Image: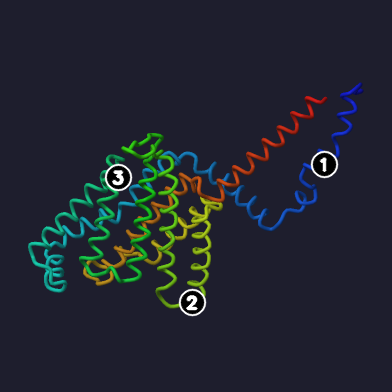
Amino acid sequence: MSIRGTASRQFHSMPISISSRAPPMASSADPSPLETLRRQATRIEELLDSVSGPVRPYVPAIGRFFIVATFLEDAFRILSQWSDQVFYLYSYRHIPRFIVIIFLFFNVVAMLTGSLCVITRKYTGYAVGALVGVVVSQAIGYGLIFELKFFLRNLSVIGGLLLVLSDTFSQRRMAFAGLPNVDEKDKQMYFLLAGRVLLIFLFIGFVVSGGWTFGRLFISAVGFTACVMVVVGFKTKLSAMLLVLMLSLFNIFVNHYWTYSSNHPNRDFLKYEYFQTLSIVGGLLLVVNAGAGKLSIDEKKKVTIFIATLSEIQLLTECLQIY
């Protein structure tokens, strides 16, 4: 087909302009190691998405249940060991007995009702506030607020609760007198970021406690790398899934409280560690389901690709109009 007249002159003048706007072929043919890693991670994410398709609708519910599992276990443990709890707080913490009873009663009620509300997604904001209050009050009441490992682990639990809160936000808008409307999608974005950041404190606690071995060094390096990727939002779903796998294996092979007799002194300690880790696994499952949100490298990458695609479409449209 031949091109005639003015259109022909305009069309033949286009190649220099097109070549200056098109990406160089050498860079696409020889991608950087980071780009190669990103592509491989994308393929793995797509494979995981296809494999996990049947269970995906249930992941948020499983994640919420795992997050509150530590509170349910703690509530039943206080009820089953009521006299021991009262004795410890009264005799060793020197708290008046009637305050101890009120303290334990409200903790049990808050943990049971808050957990039930989180699981059923009813009054989630109040439930999360109550459970965060339990974490803070127990840290003060039991004198563990300055215990580093306890502090870091509970920051991770609070991160999981913030992810529960972000999971409940919708498109509703909340109006406050004298203030601009607050879009709950914006709050979801910030709560999701805060939850991701707090989740990594579990691995920080793991790094600063215990002796160093090659296996511990390797697990710490891999886990911390995955945590950083979750925080910055780079291949977030894949990184969170890796952490879910690592923590689940850690729970099975290290926190195996069920192998100890009921009278063994390590049983309660390992049981506490097991359910706290399970709670953090629940938070990571919510990250796997929801992704990193807008404040992430993944989201910025999508926006960049979208803009680049629009530019290519616009350029093609201009060429077709000239043609």
* Residue 232 shows up from this direction: yes
Q: Amino acid at mark 3?
A: Gly
Q: Identify which residue, 166 or 85, lies in the foreground.
A: 166
Q: Are marks 1 and 2 in contact (CB under 8 Å)?
A: no
Q: Quadrant of residue 150?
A: bottom left
Q: Nearer the viewer, mark 3 or mark 1?
A: 1
Q: Identify which residue, 249 or 203, lies in the foreground.
A: 203
Q: Position of residue 18 (x, y in %)?
A: 81, 38
Q: Which residue is mark 1?
A: 19
Which residue sits at x=27%, y=43%? Answer: 117
Work out how far the residue at label 3 is from the one at label 1, CA to CA, in angstroms. 55 Å
Furthest residue in direction front, as rendered: 178
Q: Identify which residue, 180 or 254, lies in the foreground.
A: 180
Query: Which part of the image, by quadrant, shows the N terminus?
Result: top right
Q: Amino acid at mark 2?
A: Thr
Q: Earlier in the sequence, mark 3 or mark 1?
A: 1
- Element at label 1: helix
User: Does residue 199 sit above or below 88 in this rendering?
Assistant: above
Q: Quadrant of residue 100?
A: bottom left
Q: Which residue is mark 3?
A: 125
| Residue 274 located left or right of residue 285 | left
Q: Are marks 3 and 2 in contact (CB under 8 Å)?
A: no
Q: Nearer the viewer, mark 3 or mark 2?
A: 3
Which residue sits at x=25%, y=48%? Answer: 114
Q: Earlier in the sequence, mark 3 or mark 2?
A: 3
| Residue 25 located left or right of residue 270 | right
Work out how far the residue at label 1 is from the one at label 2, CA to CA, in angstroms. 55 Å
Q: Amino acid at mark 1?
A: Ser
User: Does residue 173 sit above or below 47 in this rendering?
Assistant: above
Q: Which residue is mark 2?
A: 213
* Residue 1 shows up from this direction: no
Neighbour tally class for label 1: few under 14, some 14-19, many 20 plus, Cα within 10 Å: few
